[in-house]
Image (cartoon, grey):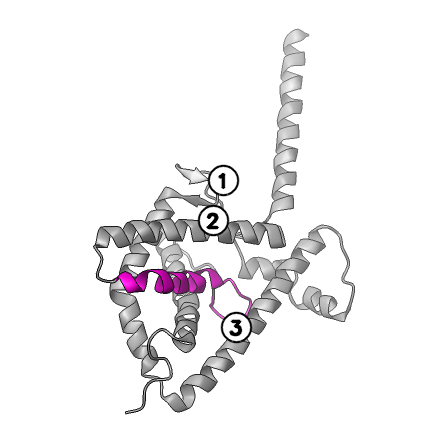
Amino acid sequence: MAESFASGMNFYKLFWVFFIGCFLGVVIETIWCLLRLGHIESRAGLIYGPFNLVYGLGALLMTITLVRFTGYRDLWLFLVGSLIGGIFEYICSFVQEKLFGTVSWNYKNFPLNLNGRINMLYCFFWGLLALVWVKDLYPRLAWLIEKIPNAYGKPLTWLCLIFMGFNTIMSSCVVYRMSERQKGIQPSNVFWRYIDTHYDDERVKRIYPNMKLVGLMNKVKEKAKGEHTIFYKQQVQTKID
């Protein structure tokens, strides 16, 4: 029997881990949202399909760093997974804010948070996910990936890779233009006009319901602070009079 195109931990295996992780993460978080909030809300990170790069990259990171330690104690895997997941989530939040001026989560109302980007509870969730991934999900997933016929495995991998690359670029452009529109910057060419026409603020909001513009958030805070200051001065003046 010929060796699988995705045997071991080669490029093809890792891509499919990433691709499936992008999808599974959205499914799991959508179910969590339904249980917690009582309604279905988009958890996609890309404009085409139910995919989120954060989960795909997280699955890839856990696979590369932890799968080799499958035989280690569960507590060790949990603690290391919590640390890796927390660092990864912090970096994702930081990069998103610096590149696009947006944030998709804010944990400032949670105890034991760090700059609102991560908190202890969600780090523990990452630890549990890492433990389940290493001990159960990854071995099953690796087996299924290797069952893909060799004749289709490599071509299908490259097709999906091209799709995800295009999806990522287009999604980045959509978020970038939303940020530019908030600044009053007009589209400079036909491509940006296409983005504005097909992905206006209302549609982007449906795709990314939890994403906030940092600049807009700061303006709201400054306005609220100014209104509070005015109210306080009025109260002081009233007492003096």
What residue appears at the point 54 percent right and 61 percent down from the top-left corner?
A: 207
Q: Nearer the viewer, residue 219 or 133?
A: 133
Q: Which residues are magenta?
A: 42-69
Tag nearer the camera, 2 or 3 = 2
In space, the residues marked 2 and 3 are separated at their CA atoms by 23 Å
Q: Nearer the viewer, residue 160 or 64?
A: 64
Return the x and y of residue 234 as percentages of the image width and height.
Answer: 66, 18
92 relative to 191 in the view: left or right? left
Mark 2 / mark 3, whichever is N-terminal? 2
Location of residue 232 by image quarter: top right
Q: Quadrant of the N terminus?
A: bottom left
Instruction: Report if residue 45 lies within the magenta region.
Output: yes
Check disc 1 and give the amino acid type: Asn
Q: Nearer the viewer, residue 215 or 6?
A: 6
| Crowding near the residue tagged with mark 1, few <14, some 14–19, many ≥20 C-alpha atoms within 10 Å | few
189 relative to 200 in the view: left or right? right
Q: Nearer the viewer, residue 221 or 58?
A: 58
Location of residue 237 by image quarter: top right
Mark 1 / mark 3, whichever is N-terminal? 1
Q: Secondary structure at mark 2?
A: helix
User: What residue would you read off at disc 1?
Assistant: 115
In space, the residues marked 2 and 1 are separated at their CA atoms by 9 Å
Check disc 3 and give the amino acid type: Met
User: What residue would you read off at disc 2?
Assistant: 90
- Main secondary structure of the magenta stretch: helix
Location of residue 137 by image quarter: bottom left
Return the x and y of residue 167 as percentages of the image width and height.
Answer: 56, 71
User: What residue would you read off at disc 3?
Assistant: 164
What residue appears at the point 75 percent right and 52 percent down from the top-left corner?
A: 184
Q: Secondary structure at mark 3?
A: helix
Circle 2/circle 1 CB separation < 8 Å:
yes
Residue 154 visible in the displayed image: yes
